[in-house]
Image (spheres, helix red, strand yellow):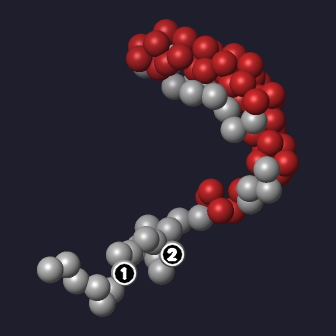
Amino acid sequence: MNSIGANCNELKKSYDECFNAWFAEKFLKGSTDESQCEPLFKVYKQCVKTAMKEQQIEIGEIEADHLGSEKEYKPPTGSSSS
């Protein structure tokens, strides 16, 4: 899957490769120290934030919790199927 910004795709690929190696070689063997990929993640995250800004996507829209709130999708009321 590509990143939200085309210029972030290579950063995402590098981070994904690091994460997958860490997961298989460290995490599944009991180590939860994920610091080896942190520098890549920081650079990738900044790229994504920049791409979101360029596409006028607000980070708050993504982080907002809609489940159980009035913003959660609810089917229209008053219409019935016959």
What is the quadrant of residue 64 in the picture? bottom right
Q: Is residue 37 visible to us here?
A: no
Give the camera-side residue of 3 and 17: 3
Coordinates of residue 58 in the picture (x, y in percent) = 74, 59
Coordinates of residue 65 in the picture (x, y in percent) = 53, 65
Q: Is residue 21 visible to us here?
A: yes
Q: Residue at x 43, y 71 (%)?
A: 73
Q: Report the residue marked by disc 2.
A: 71
- Which image quadrant: the N terminus? top right
Image position of 65 with respect to 4: above or below: below
Image position of 46 with respect to 29: above or below: below
What is the quadrant of residue 51 in the picture? top right
Left or right of 44? Residue 16 is left
* Residue ranking furthest to the bottom: 78
Helix, strand or loop under label 2: loop
Which label number is shown at residue 17? Answer: none
Circles 2, 1 touching at the beta carbon (< 8 Å): no
Q: Amino acid at mark 1?
A: Pro
Q: Report the residue marked by disc 1.
A: 76
Left or right of 43? Residue 67 is left
Give the camera-side residue of 28 and 64: 64
Helix, strand or loop under label 1: loop
Label 2, label 1: how many angstroms apart (C-alpha)?
13 Å
